[in-house]
Amino acid sequence: MKTVQITTLGGPTSLELLDAPNPDAGSSTVLIDVHAAGIAFPEVLQSRGQYQVKPDLPFIPGAEVAGTVVSAPEDSGLAVGQRVAALPFLGAFAEQVACSPEAVFPIPDSLSFEAAAAIPFNYLTAHFALLRRGRLAAGESVLVHGAAGGVGSAAIQVAKAFGAGRVISVTSTPEKGAAAVAAGSDEYVLADGFRDAVKELTGGKGVDVVVDTVGGDRFTDSLRSLAANGRILVIGFTGGSIPEVKVNRLLLNNLDVVGVAWGAYATVRPGYLQGQWAELLPKIEAGGIVPLMGDVYPMEKVSDALIAIDERRAVGKLILGVRGSG
Ligand SMILES: NC(=O)c1ccc[n+]([C@@H]2O[C@H](COP(=O)([O-])OP(=O)(O)OC[C@H]3O[C@@H](n4cnc5c(N)ncnc54)[C@H](OP(=O)(O)O)[C@@H]3O)[C@@H](O)[C@H]2O)c1
């Protein structure tokens, strides 16, 4: 089968299109014909050996797919030919992938494979971050950094779909701000000077929850943007540096800095991913969750996608088109 592989840790330009044997599904995993795969920031980090998961070289990256079931364990409840999304966590940039039934999710016919491939990684992360770790309550306000990106745009929609009040996005450009609003944000503010803008928009009160995918030197201003009893969700560090916290800021206003490691949590709890999907599916079917789609790249152009993410040009979720749409 055709695959994209990381053979050296030379960064986004070093991915190679190579043939490889089809995966052996065995009796316990689901074999899937991949139609589309989601591309995300971690693949940029993996191409440089900078991600927390460091497989031996060479390996096939890609965490999530949408496609059709080729074979499935009898007790999985999945049928040959069924349309599914799945989270193999690795191996998705290929024409076929094998995945634990725990992480295979039936999708509605109304959802294209491209849109379905945009959902698992980002929306399950956002769901875990906001609801489990962030304890989002009905009507609470949410500030989302990197809001036109994959996790950010998912966080906007999950927040809204699960009862948040006002959602304010932070983006580096007006174009990305408009994309965040199109994804469902009530408004956007520019990253430069966001603290003052949030203060003004909230009448000085601040927001209840900050979704932080960026880290870096914004962190202190994010803490200052929280209302009393607010929570900041530490999700990623696309800004490049890991912030430090003066904990007196937490004490003064009863603030929480909350770590979010969705994969580490979900993969050791059988049934957790399926439970998350069961909560998201009605929102997908009702149209409350419609991924903000970026460009679709053919397999031979995968490096262009990673470069776009690396250079901060990506808007919405980038997709690898493996077998065309459907
Ligand atoms: N903790 C978890 O469980 C978990 C799960 C999934 C992903 N993640 C992490 O979440 C983060 C976001 O992933 P993603 O797939 O949403 O990425 P993405 O689609 O590329 O979006 C990231 C956003 O970060 C902002 N950004 C700020 N500084 C940047 C820089 N120097 N370079 C690139 N982007 C920059 C950009 O928005 P602006 O230009 O508007 O600022 C961009 O839209 C990554 O760090 C990823 O590893 C964590």
Image: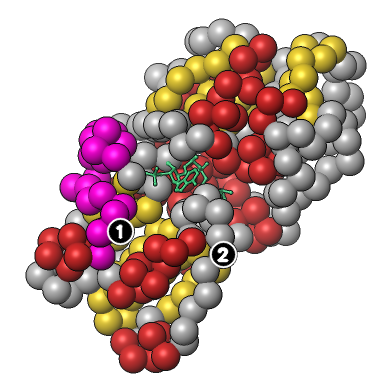
Colour mapping used in the image: secondary structure
At a point 17% along the width and 74% down the height, the residue shown is: 205
Please provide the residue range marked out in magenta. Answer: 173-195
Residue 179 shown in magenta: yes
Residue 242, labelled with which disc? 2
- Residue 60 seen in the current view: no
**Pointer 2 and pointer 1: residues touching (CB < 8 Å)?**
no
Residue 278 shown in magenta: no
Quadrant of residue 13 within the rendered picture: top right
Q: How many marks?
A: 2
Q: Camera-side residue: 299 or 47?
A: 47
Amino acid type at mark 1:
Leu
Which image quarter holds the N terminus? top right
At a point 25% along the width and 76% down the height, the residue shown is: 227
Q: Camera-side residue: 45 or 21?
A: 45
- Image side of residue 144 versus residue 263, left or right: left
Q: Quick check: is the Cβ at mark 1 less than 8 Å away from ligand 1?
A: no
Above/below status of 188 relative to 219:
above
